[in-house]
Image (cartoon, rainbow, N blue to C red):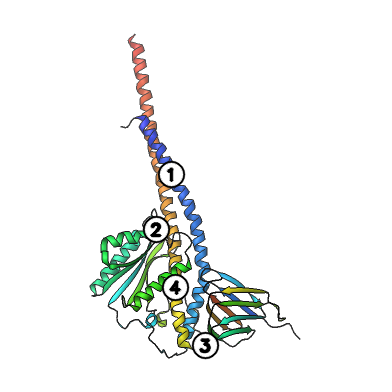
Amino acid sequence: MPSLKEQRVRIASVKSTQKITSAMKMVAAAKLRRAQEAAAAGRPYAEKMAAMLQAVLASGYQPEEALPLLQGTGKNDTYLLIIVSTDKGLCGGFNTAIFRAARLRMKHLGAQGKTVKIVTIGKKARDVFVRETGKRVVKSYADITRKKVDYDLVAGISEDLQQLLSEGAFDVAEVLYNKFRSAMLQVPTWQQVIPMPSIQDGVPESGLPTPVKSQYEFEPDAARLLAKLLPKNLSVQLFSVLLDSVASEHGARMSAMDNATRNAGDMIRRLTLSYNRARQAMITKELIEIISGAEAV
Amino acid sequence: MAAAQKILLEIVTPAETVFRGQVALVTVPASEGEMGVMARHAPLITALDEGELKLYDEDNGVISKTHRISGGFVDISDNKCTVLAEKLL
């Protein structure tokens, strides 16, 4: 049995931990709201971009040159997994869930005889996958999701990806991220980004508006327009994935910190109970000693 | 003459919708040369170069607002002109 003083110290330390976790929960809640707003504000652009792409594709253009972003490289031997994690910890099972999904996907692809390469976004994924798979990690990005997600940085990633694609480093790219359902629920999801999923499958995420009959005129011609649109579309897709992942991160952190605060509360209650019992026992013991001492006289 | 017809203009960046409102005329820096868009323009999709968007609230030749963009796309259909700008400068 620890001494009374030890127990007091213990209670005080749990209390201050509880204060920290509850403050972190508040912060995460505020950031979550902001992240959700950012995700909502970014939606019109992504939707319009998808609609435009569809209009151009529906026009029956004649491609002059190969468009690997749309048609792929003609093979599907090498897969590139883009794993989106966080830079900071203390967000519950957020990263664990995405890593588990990533390992599963790697195993699945590996079983089909595909080569898998990895691009990580966020420090956590980099740390884990560099250690686990070493050479497979071709590129790592950190501090992208730290503050507000910056479109320019994302455009940089998309350029790097196109560079890798043109060098023939991979054939198919998929992005793995935690999709935001609610503050409590984030679903690890994978989504193909290169080559662009065909229109029949619907471009996931954006919820394509009703197909537009192609009564459009194009300037310059459809093929050249497409060549310009596709890279932008890649950036936009990555951008909305990142916005979604950031919202998920704050949601996950909020519920993790909520749990931690509640656990700390339980712990304080239990510790206080045992402290009070010990204190009471001590008083009783002293009383007995005094009384029996008085009787002896 | 009835009040001049207007077209709904939207200027959207990846991060937010910058402008949404009725204008009489907007000129955009299309890749094939600067282009004016008025009400009931034929459906058109075109790429934009770096340059200025000039908004005319009324059809009187007075520029009411300009936005500098770094390039992007414009989609005109159903009396609506959507400018997808990469970035506002």
Measuring from the top left, give residue A80's x and y in whole percent. Answer: 32, 72
| Amino acid at dot 3 | Phe
Q: Which of A120 and A175 is in front in this view?
A: A120
Check whether the beta carbons of the residues at disc 2 and disc 4 lie within 8 A of each other: no
Foreground tag (1 vs 2)? 2
| Amino acid at dot 2 | Asp
Assign a secondary structure to mark 4. helix
Mark 1 vs mark 2: which is more N-terminal? 1
Mark 1 vs mark 3: which is more N-terminal? 1
Q: Which residue is situated farthest in the top direction here?
A: A297
Residue where numbered disc 3 is placed: A218
Assign a secondary structure to mark 2. loop
* Chain to which the residue tagged by mark 2 belongs: A
Q: Distance between the residues labelled 1 and 2?
A: 23 Å
Left or right: where A42 falls relative to A119:
right
Residue where numbered disc 2 is placed: A87
Foreground tag (1 vs 3)? 3
Residue where numbered disc 1 is placed: A18
Mark 3 vs mark 2: which is more N-terminal? 2
Q: How far apart are marks 3 and 4 (CA)?
A: 22 Å
Measuring from the top left, give residue A270's x and y in whole percent. Answer: 38, 39
Measuring from the top left, give residue B70's x and y in whole percent. Answer: 53, 74
Measuring from the top left, give residue A32's x and y in whole percent. Answer: 48, 58
Assign a secondary structure to mark 1. helix
Instruction: Decide if residue A49 is in sight here.
Output: yes
